[in-house]
């Protein structure tokens, strides 16, 4: 199974991004969070999910590993396919969706194109217990990652990189699916690779 891909953004149309990955042009249908990371001409790493259906294989891209995990919960809801699930995440972030499910805010969920009352009720009912620990674990993970990124940011300042360069490197590190598990040294090494490439 493909967990993530890294490549240069060639084109962005709607929520479909074309990435040049080792000379291959891959189409990735992206969530709102993933789209915010994609700029034409820049390298990006996206967490992805490969879906295979009767119409062929499709790649779906996410802003981080946590959003990918939520997507996997969403496609297991009865009647929800991968295309409908990515449509939901184009309108709402995983964090917003978790809050909506916890509050059973059906009206907010019905604002998403293609989601009617019955589907909204089914999402809230089937996922209410599964998302209980999601926010807490996400916050712990981001807290750990942010602490490491602060160290990397200070190190890059000491090496006389500009704020624009540092922001670009930090944005890239935030998109890594395994960023929380990496050491500060490995994260700094990745940042220097991006800035020197």
Image (cartoon, rainbow, N blue to C red):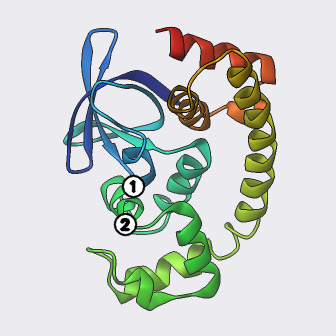
Residue 117 position in % (x across, y down): 37, 89
Classed neighbour count for the residue bearing mark 1: other residues with Cα under 10 Å, few (<14), some (14–19), many (≥20): many
In the image, taking residue 192 as reference, residue 168 lies left or right, namely left
**Which residue has dot 1 on it?**
32
**Number of other residues with Cα within 10 Å of mark 2, as a class: few under 14, some 14 to 19, many 20 or more:** some
Camera-side residue: 83 or 91? Answer: 91
Mark before the other along the chain sequence, 1 or 2: 1
Q: Nearer the viewer, residue 26 or 161?
A: 161
Where 14 falls versus 191 (above or below)? Answer: below
Residue 22 in the image, given as x and y percentages of width and height: 34, 9
Image coordinates of residue 173 in percent, x first then y, are: 61, 31
Q: Position of residue 167 (x, y in %)?
A: 55, 35
**Residue in front for this viewpoint, 108 or 35:** 35
Q: Are the residues tagged 1 and 2 within 8 Å (C-beta)?
A: yes
Side (left or right) of 20 relative to 74: left
Instruction: Give how far apart the Cα atoms at labels 1 and 2 are.
Output: 7 Å
Q: Look at 19% across and 42% down and name the residue there.
A: 55
Local SS, label 2: helix
The residue at 32%/84% (across/down) is 116
Find residue 79 and report its image quarter: bottom left
Compared to residue 141, the image places residue 28 above or below, namely above
Mark carried by residue 184: none
Q: Is residue 53 left or right of residue 14?
A: right
């Amino acid at each position: 199974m493909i967990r993530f891909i890294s490549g240069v953004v060639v084109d962005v149309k709607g929520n479909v991004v074309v990435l040049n990955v080792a000379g291959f042009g891959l189409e990735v249908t992206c969530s709102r969070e993933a789209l915010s990371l994609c700029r034409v001409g820049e390298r990006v790493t996206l967490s992805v999910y490969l879906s295979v259906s009767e119409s062929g294989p499709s790649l779906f891209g996410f802003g981080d590993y946590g959003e990918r995990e939520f997507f996997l919960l969403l496609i297991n809801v009865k009647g929800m396919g991968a295309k409908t699930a990515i449509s939901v995440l184009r309108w709402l972030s995983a964090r917003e969706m978790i809050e909506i499910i916890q509050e059973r805010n059906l009206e907010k969920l019905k604002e998403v194109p293609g989601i009617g009352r019955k589907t909204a009720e089914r999402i809230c009912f089937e996922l209410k217990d599964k998302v209980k620990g999601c926010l807490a674990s996400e916050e712990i993970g981001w807290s750990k990652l942010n602490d490491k990124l602060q160290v990397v940011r200070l190190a890059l300042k000491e090496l006389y990189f500009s704020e624009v360069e540092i922001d670009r490197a930090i944005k890239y590190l935030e998109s890594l699916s395994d960023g929380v598990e990496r050491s500060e040294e490995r994260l700094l090494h990745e940042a220097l690779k991006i800035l020197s490439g």
